[in-house]
């Protein structure tokens, strides 16, 4: 085929990419590490413009703003606060024109919300792989056709899995067990809602593999789990896949693995990346 193609404008004539103005939601286990790294200039092309958090902050390296005010000054919001924030704010962020990077992926198993987010804009929505790996490969495998089975087994310290909806017997079992206890078995549609601060990974696997109902999730409380474990096993006509990670939990918030803020920074680096980096 022959075609007459217009030459690309000279690079020097193109405007330089503006530094992205980041609004960080959540100054907790994830947010403090992300915000400190941003304030120290570790992510080329991104500056920490403001922080949004429920509590008054005394030690923050950027001004604390309300969500409404943040949307008037930021062009990329990084969510590290919780699923409720995604439900309440994601659509407004995108409609304001800002992009959104989500850590609390569990909110995204709700098809009504994801439908609204797909229709919103001009902002774009991104999610971080967070505590699990292999998602890029699982996304690529979908190009070959659907997977036939996906399982995630998450094992954590019992205290990080206790939930207000649990009955007295299960609560006591989690408090006293000396052995692993299976606390829930379900799909990625159901599990992240039941453990909103500790099984977002199930939703992340579902986002990568394309169907929350296909992802079988087993949640295990193990008093010996000084490392948090996530095992993803998937199979389809084109191959079989297994990814296993074991993370040291954050000291202040052991529901969250220490690696997660660094996964957020890695995702952010890819979104805002500059010439001079291999992305
Ligand atoms: N994708 C993944 O692999 C992972 C995702 N996550 C997600 O990230 C979230 C944050 O994790 P982590 O940093 O460990 O949690 P933390 O509880 O340590 O910190 C969350 C911070 O956000 C604040 N916050 C909560 N709701 C709001 C709100 N509506 N507006 C402003 N601030 C708010 C909290 O304040 P307060 O305490 O007053 O509510 C707290 O300061 C988790 O809830 C989970 O959903 C976590 C781990 C892994
Ligand atoms: O940090 C982790 O290991 C996983 C986690 O809390 C989550 O997925 O919500």
Image (cartoon, grey):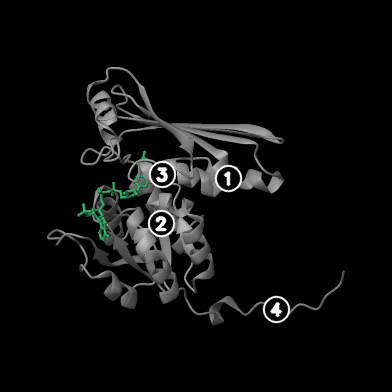
Residue furthest right in the image: 1
Q: Earlier in the sequence, mark 3 or mark 2?
A: 2
Which residue is under mark 1?
209
* Residue 265 at least partly seen: yes
Q: Which mark is residue 7?
A: 4
Q: Tag 4's secondary structure?
A: loop
Give me the residue at 42% from left, 49% from top: 106
Q: Nearer the viewer, mark 2 or mark 4?
A: 2
Give me the residue at 35% from left, 23% from top: 181
Residue 19, image x, y percentages? 39, 71
Q: Eyeballing the image, is 276 above or below 21?
A: above
Give me the residue at 57% from left, 76% from top: 11
Instruction: Compute the Cα span from label 2 to label 1.
Output: 17 Å
* Residue 276 at least partly seen: no
Q: Earlier in the sequence, mark 4 or mark 1?
A: 4
Pointers 3 and 4 in contact (C-beta within 8 Å): no
On whether ligand 1 comes within 8 Å of the CB at mark 2, the answer is: no
Instruction: Compute the Cα span from label 3 to label 2.
Output: 14 Å
Instruction: Compute the Cα span from label 2 to label 4.
Output: 37 Å
Label 4: how many Cα within 10 Å (few below 14, some 14–19, many 20+): few
Pointers 3 and 1 in contact (C-beta within 8 Å): no
Which residue is under mark 2?
102
Q: Which mark is residue 10?
A: none
* Left or right placement of residue 2 versus residue 205 in this view: right
Q: Nearer the viewer, mark 3 or mark 2?
A: 3
Q: Earlier in the sequence, mark 3 or mark 4?
A: 4
Pointers 2 and 1 in contact (C-beta within 8 Å): no
Quadrant location of the N terminus?
bottom right
Which residue is under mark 3?
192
Q: Tag 2's secondary structure?
A: strand
Q: Nearer the viewer, mark 3 or mark 1?
A: 3
Q: Eyeballing the image, is 240 above or below 129?
A: above
């Amino acid at each position: 085929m022959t075609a007459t193609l217009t030459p690309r404008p000279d690079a020097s004539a193109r405007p330089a990419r503006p530094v992205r103005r980041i609004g960080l939601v959540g100054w907790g286990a994830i947010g403090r590490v992300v915000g400190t790294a941003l304030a120290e200039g570790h992510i080329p092309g991104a500056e920490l413009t403001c922080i949004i958090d429920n509590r008054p902050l005394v030690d923050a390296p950027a001004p604390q703003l309300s969500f409404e005010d943040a949307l008037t000054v930021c062009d990329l919001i990084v969510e590290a606060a919780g699923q409720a924030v995604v439900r309440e704010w994601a659509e407004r962020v995108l409609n304001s024109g800002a992009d959104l990077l989500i850590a609390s992926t569990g909110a995204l198993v709700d098809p009504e919300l994801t439908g609204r987010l797909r229709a919103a804009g001009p902002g774009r929505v991104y999610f971080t792989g967070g505590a699990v790996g292999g998602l890029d490969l699982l996304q690529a495998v979908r190009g070959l056709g659907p997977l036939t089975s996906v399982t995630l087994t998450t094992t954590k310290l019992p205290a990080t899995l206790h939930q207000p909806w649990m009955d007295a017997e299960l609560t006591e079992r989690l408090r006293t067990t000396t052995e692993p206890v299976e606390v829930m078995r379900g799909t990625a549609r159901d599990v992240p809602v039941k453990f909103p601060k500790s099984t977002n990974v199930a939703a992340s696997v579902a986002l990568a593999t394309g169907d929350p109902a296909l992802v079988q999730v087993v949640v295990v409380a193990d008093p010996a789990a000084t490392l948090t474990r996530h095992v993803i096993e998937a199979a389809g006509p084109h191959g079989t896949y297994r990814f296993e990670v074991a993370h040291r939990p954050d000291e202040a918030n052991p529901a969250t693995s220490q690696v997660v803020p660094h996964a957020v920074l890695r995702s952010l680096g890819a979104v805002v990346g500059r010439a001079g980096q291999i992305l």
